Image: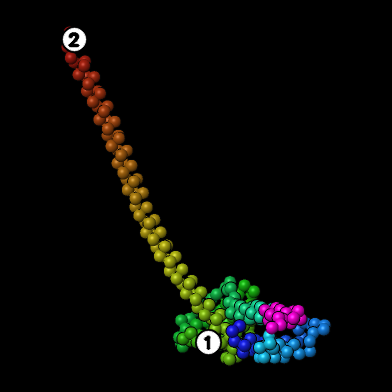
């Protein structure tokens, strides 16, 4: 490092970490009593010709590895806690009634994949009462379920949107069925007309053949 101050601060920080986390630190036999102080003196007095000793290298490497390990474990624990806190249950049963007004509160009954039940009473999308597995919650705990309620609202909206799409598709299918039935009626009527025309054509052909036969009999021979 170009800055001696930064370098010394870095060494001191490592040593402070070792002291604060002494229960994790490795003990090295034969290590100098005050290696950090000696190292800093050499840097300040421009006598830092000596490279890191074996024990200094091991101590520095151990500190780096320890910091990396603790940081990694802390991050994993934080991520796991975050996932746990933000976990949204998957609901297998949702029943909603009421429009959410003061005169007609919205009553929501839900059951997640684990069998846990939720009962919520809301007015203007604000929770008035809430029960989890039949136990009434204190008002101060409502905020803990905001993510759950938000997911419920979103799922209800998705269900409503899908229901509207299904209704529109059913209407199109009904209209197409009417058109198909009308076309089938036209095809049947056309088939009957074709059948009648075929009878007329056969009758007309038979009459022509008979007239020709009588004409041949009346024609003089020779």
- Secondary structure state at the residue bearing disc 2: loop
Q: What predominant SS class does the magenta segment belong to?
A: helix
Q: Residues within 10 Å of mark 2 (few under 14, many from 20)?
A: few
At which x and y percent is residue 162? 46, 68
Label annotation for residue 221: 2
Considering every residue shown, the one lying at the far top of the view is 222
Q: Position of residue 15 (x, y in %)?
A: 71, 88
Residue 124 in the image: state x and y as whole percent.
46, 86
**Residue 13 makes an appearance in the image:** no
Of the two numbered discs 1 and 2 on the same chain, state the one appearing first in sequence: 1
Q: In this picture, is 128 found above or below 108? A: below
Q: Position of residue 123 (x, y in %)?
A: 48, 86
Q: Tell me: 46 left or right of 202.
A: right
Is 113 located above or below residue 215 in the figure?
below
Query: Is-magenta flag for residue 61?
Result: yes
Q: Is residue 20 above or below residue 215?
A: below
Side of 102 relative to 117 (left or right): left
Name the residue nearer the viewer: 36 or 183. 36
Range covered by the magenta-colored residues: 49-68
In this picture, residue 15 sits left or right of residue 82: right
- Would you say 39 lies left or right of 188 here? right
For the point 43% across and 66% down, the residue is 165
Whether residue 206 is visible to the viewer of this picture, yes or no, is yes
Colour scheme of the picture: rainbow
Q: Tag count in the figure?
A: 2
Q: Is residue 67 magenta?
A: yes
Q: According to the image, label 1 marks what residue?
A: 127
> For numbered disc 1, what is the local secondary structure?
strand
Q: Is residue 127 above or below residue 95?
A: below
């Amino acid at each position: 490092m170009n800055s001696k101050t930064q370098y010394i601060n870095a060494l001191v920080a490592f040593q402070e970490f070792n002291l604060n986390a002494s229960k994790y630190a490795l003990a090295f036999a034969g290590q100098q009593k005050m290696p950090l102080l000696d190292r800093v003196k050499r840097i300040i007095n421009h006598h830092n010709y000596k490279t890191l000793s074996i024990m200094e290298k091991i101590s520095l490497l151990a500190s780096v590895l320890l910091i990396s390990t603790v940081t990694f474990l802390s991050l994993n624990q934080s991520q796991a806690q975050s996932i746990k806190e933000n976990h949204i249950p998957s609901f297998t049963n949702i029943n909603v009634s009421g429009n959410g007004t003061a005169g007609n509160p919205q009553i929501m009954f839900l059951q997640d994949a684990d069998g846990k039940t939720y009962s919520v009473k809301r007015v203007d999308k604000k929770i008035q009462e809430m029960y989890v597995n039949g136990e009434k919650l204190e008002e101060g705990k409502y905020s803990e379920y905001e993510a759950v309620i938000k997911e419920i609202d979103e799922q209800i909206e998705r269900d409503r949107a899908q229901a509207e799409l299904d209704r529109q598709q059913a209407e199109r299918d009904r209209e197409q069925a009417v058109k198909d039935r009308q076309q089938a009626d036209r095809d049947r009527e056309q088939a009957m007309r074709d059948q009648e025309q075929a009878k007329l054509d056969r009758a007309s052909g038979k009459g022509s053949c008979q007239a020709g036969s009588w004409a041949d009999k009346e024609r003089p021979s020779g």
